[in-house]
Amino acid sequence: MKINLKEFIFFAVLTLATTLIAQMVVLAGTNDATQEASSSKATTMAIKNQDGTSEITTITFPAAAPSTEVTDAWNDVDGSGSKQAFGGTSVPVAWLVSATDYNLHVSVTEVTGWDTLVVDENILCSDSLTLDSTTFDSNSYALSTWGTVTDMGTQTVTSTLKYFYLTINLDAAAGKTGSSTIAVLGETI
């Protein structure tokens, strides 16, 4: 799955647009997923690596079987040795850094094949580095109605960060490909 993140301001809304491309591989029935991310156009919000020092360009989901939840993504700066993890000391896939106060919203738009490949995507921007999978599951937002903007019920505060967690649930059939766009919207408070 590939996600290209592009940010733009439109009527006081900051959009982080991400193109998702996912592919299920017929061999061994696995799914390979990669996200590309860029926040180069934004001046008030950025998606950074796991220590907040560098902007990321790619989020990769490892190969997984159909009908599974993929939770251990990593970004291109920290690499596959530093995967997203839930539990005692959790590790987010990335950080969302903001220089402005925003209410956060999110949307996924299907481009090609996404609606038959991914059952849903789950996203949570949290203040916690002690996030377990149960807390993630009960507080994350499942995005499955492609194109619908969902209020995440989360706010950013100037000069603070949110830990960005993202998982996907795969469809039961293998051998599919698809793409979509995910947008994280920042509505000025």
Image (cartoon, rainbow, N blue to C red):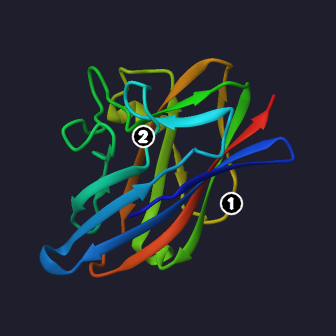
Of callouts 2 and 1, the N-terminal one: 2
- What residue would you read off at disc 2? 137
Residue in view at x 53 percent, y 33 percent? 125
Residue in view at x 48 percent, y 71 percent? 179
Q: Nearer the viewer, residue 189 or 137?
A: 189
Quadrant where the N terminus lies?
A: bottom left
Residue 103 lies, in percent from the top left, at 72, 33
**Residue reaching furthest to the front:** 40
> Residue 81 has which mark?
none
Residue in view at x 68 percent, y 32 percent? 44
Residue 131 lies, in percent from the top left, at 37, 26
Q: Nearer the viewer, residue 31 or 120?
A: 31
Q: Amino acid at mark 2?
A: Asp
Q: Nearer the viewer, residue 89 or 145?
A: 89
Q: Amino acid at mark 1?
A: Thr
Residue in view at x 41 percent, y 31 percent? 135
